[in-house]
Image (cartoon, rainbow, N blue to C red):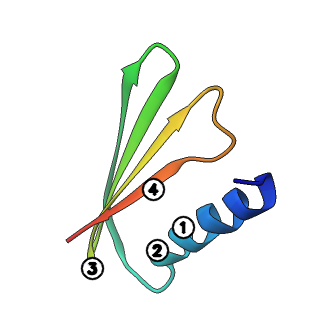
Amino acid sequence: MKFEEHAQECNEALNELVGKKVLDIKFKPYDNNCWRIYINTDGGKMVMSFCKDWSCPEVESRD
């Protein structure tokens, strides 16, 4: 996947937060070079995983 396509995919995933009320955020390291942010909203939960060498976070939406 090209960098531009990957960036667009990341942007679309993060746009899921637009218009939602953020209720709680938790930050947890899960590896030497990786972290997770758990975002609870009024529409469900979003988990963002970041690693030092990644160009963009992995975003997972949960109900």
- SS state under label 2: helix
Nearer to the camera, 55 or 47: 55
Q: Contact (CB < 8 A) between labels 4 and 1?
A: yes
Q: Residues within 10 Å of mark 4 (few under 14, many from 20)?
A: many
Q: Distance between the Cα atoms at labels 2 and 1?
A: 6 Å
Q: CA distance from mark 4 to mark 3?
A: 15 Å
Residue type of the residue flagged with mark 4: Val
Amino acid type indicated by mark 1: Leu
Mark number displayed over residue 59: 4
* Identity of the residue furthest to the left in this view: 63
User: On the image, numbered disc 3 is attached to which residue?
Assistant: 43
- Which residue is outermost to the bottom? 19
- Give the vertical position of 47 relative to 40 (above or below): above
Quick one: label 2 or label 3, which is nearer the N terminus? 2
Q: Earlier in the sequence, mark 4 or mark 3?
A: 3
Sequence-wise, which precedes: disc 1 or disc 3? 1
Point out the tag, 4 or 1, that comes first from the N-terminus. 1
**Residue nearer the viewer, 25 or 47:** 47
Where disc 4 sits, the SS reads strand
